[in-house]
Every structure is written in structure tokens, then in C-alpha cells.
Amino acid sequence: MANRREFLKGASLLTLGALFSNCAEAQAAPKGGGPLGLQIYSLGPELSANGVAEGLKRIKESGYSYIELAGYRDGKIGQASMAEFKKMADDAGIEIVSSHLNPPTRDYSKDNFEEIKDFWKKATEDHQVLGLQYMVQPGLPNCNSQEDAQFVGEVFNAAGEITKAAGIQFGYHNHNYEFNRLTPGGTEPISFAIRGFRPAEGQPMPKTVEEIFIESTDPSKVIFELDVYWTVMGGQDPVEWINKYADRIQMLHIKDRLILGDSGMMNFPKIFEAFYSHNHKYFFVEIEDTRSGIQFDRVKASADFLNNSGLIKK
Ligand code: MG
């Protein structure tokens, strides 16, 4: 009997020990509470449904502390002037870190190089009032050959020089087509969708558009914002890219099929581990299907997922 009692006593101590050790672990790695960024495109028309000022407050209440803009056009973000938007963000306690914008053409050539530069000059002037750190191009210019992509790299360098003079860092954001491959003198891309593509005997593997952009741009003028979902959809592992181009990929779009974590297809623990290991900071949650009518719910659920994941640095 005594032995049994001793055993039970030991067992309950073990259980208590296990409980305490769990508590200690929970204290060592608290869940929740790191700063989260949101790409405002995620809200679609819901952002302004009750006025943008209210929408920005709701973003803050949903768990986000900073944003990346979308919708710059003719000196405005949607219907708001840059100064009005900045005031509404300040009032909501939201920091504007970045803005997505595209020049008015996807066909880059020597003929319209100056026109594209003029776009970036005007856009930079307009964006200065926001006090932001990044201006990011999310749209892929047409590229059929390696030379086309290298020329786009030159244009990015010029854009980066313009924004840099105003203290703003220029960046490029990918979708999946940046994982198409381009050959020297090529007439069309080799699709990322061709799995297991191999070049002809003795030929080197053609580079992806993203590699050519990274390698043909000046690190002091152009950084990259990797959209991790589109990287996976392009048949690539975002963790490999984050590690391979550790100094160039400085921001992320944290994205899943819809609400973060729901599909199970995204390896967010490894993605954040790699990203933070290179001392980067800013990432933006994004949900691209914006016509649901419940985008705020999805955006909030995605913030909750991250805050409960234990992955986000304070
Ligand atoms: Mg994106």
C-alpha cells in the first residue's frame, strides 16, 4: 500500500512538474503581440465602406500597427489626398511604412524610359508627405528575353535613384510569373508551370525573371519584397529565396490561399525563421480575393493566427 501511495505521490509530483515546466515554457516563448503589417488592398471596397478614417481604425483594432498602401493614382490614394490619408492614419495610430504603385505602362523601352522616370519623380514628390520608408512596384513589366529583364533592371535602378534622393527605398514585389525563365535573345518566357524543365544538353539553366531582376539591379537602389504565396505558386520555396538573397529580399508579403494558416500549404514557421535570421523586420499580411464582403473578418482572423502562432518578433 505504502509503495502504491509513494508511487501516486511521485506521479502527482511528476504531473505537477510537467505542469510547471509547461508554464515555464509558455513564459519563455509567449504567444502573441508582435507588430503586424497589412497591405490595405486586402480590404477591397470594405476599407472605405464607412469612410477610410473608420476603416483605418478598424485595421488597428484588428491587430495591425502598420500598413502598406495600394491605389495611388493622380496624387491620391483612392479619393483621399496624400495629406488627408496621412492624417487619417495618424489619427488611427497606424504607421504608413510602404506604398504599392506602378508606372502607367508595362512595355519598357528606351523610348519611354524618360516618361517612366517622370512618373517616379512625381510619385516620389507625392509620397514624401506620408513620411514612409518604401515605394514598391508590384506589377511585372513585359519580359520575353533575358535582355528585356535586364533593361527592366536598369529602369528599376533609375526609379531607385529617384526615390533614394528623397530618402525613400524603392522595391519590387513578385507574383508567380517572375518564376518564368528567360533565355538570351528569347521570344517568350519558359513557363514556371512546366515542372521539371531541363535545358537542352550542354546548355545552362535559363534564369528566372526574379533572379535577373535581383542580379541586374544595384543593391543600394533596389530591394525586393517577396510574396511568399506567389513564390510557392510559382513552384519555388520562399525559404530558399529568403536565404539565397538575404540582403536583397528585405520585406515579405505574408499570404495564404485566403485566411493565413487555413490551407496548411504555407510553411510560415520556416519563412519567419529565415526572414528574422537576416535581421529583417517588415512584412505585410495580404488577402487578394477582396470581393467576399467579409474581408475585415479575414484580416482579423489572419492577425489572430499570427498573434497565436508565437512566430512574430516583438
Ligand atoms: Mg502580394
Image: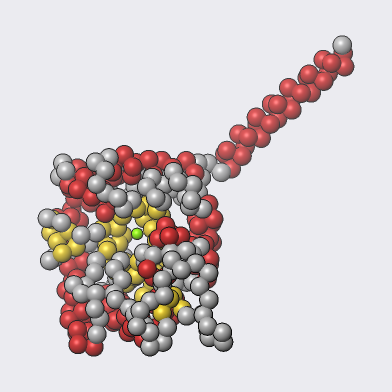
Q: How is the image coloured?
A: secondary structure
76 relative to 269 in the view: left or right: left
Determine which quarter of the picture holds residue 182: bottom left
* Position above or below: 194 against 92: below
The residue nearer to you, when weighing 240 against 219, is: 240
Residue 172: image location, x then y, percent:
34, 70
The residue nearer to you, when weighing 77 against 212, is: 212
Q: Can residue 83 be spotted in the picture?
A: no
Q: Residue furthest top?
A: 1
Residue 39: image location, x then y, percent:
31, 55
Residue at the spot 29% in from the left edge and 58% down from the top edge = 68
Quadrant for the N terminus in the image: top right
Residue at the spot 37% in from the left edge and 47% down from the top edge = 258
* Position above or below: 257 against 186: above
Determine which quarter of the picture holds residue 96: bottom left
Q: Quadrant of ligand 1?
A: bottom left
Residue at the spot 37% in from the left edge and 52% down from the top edge = 285
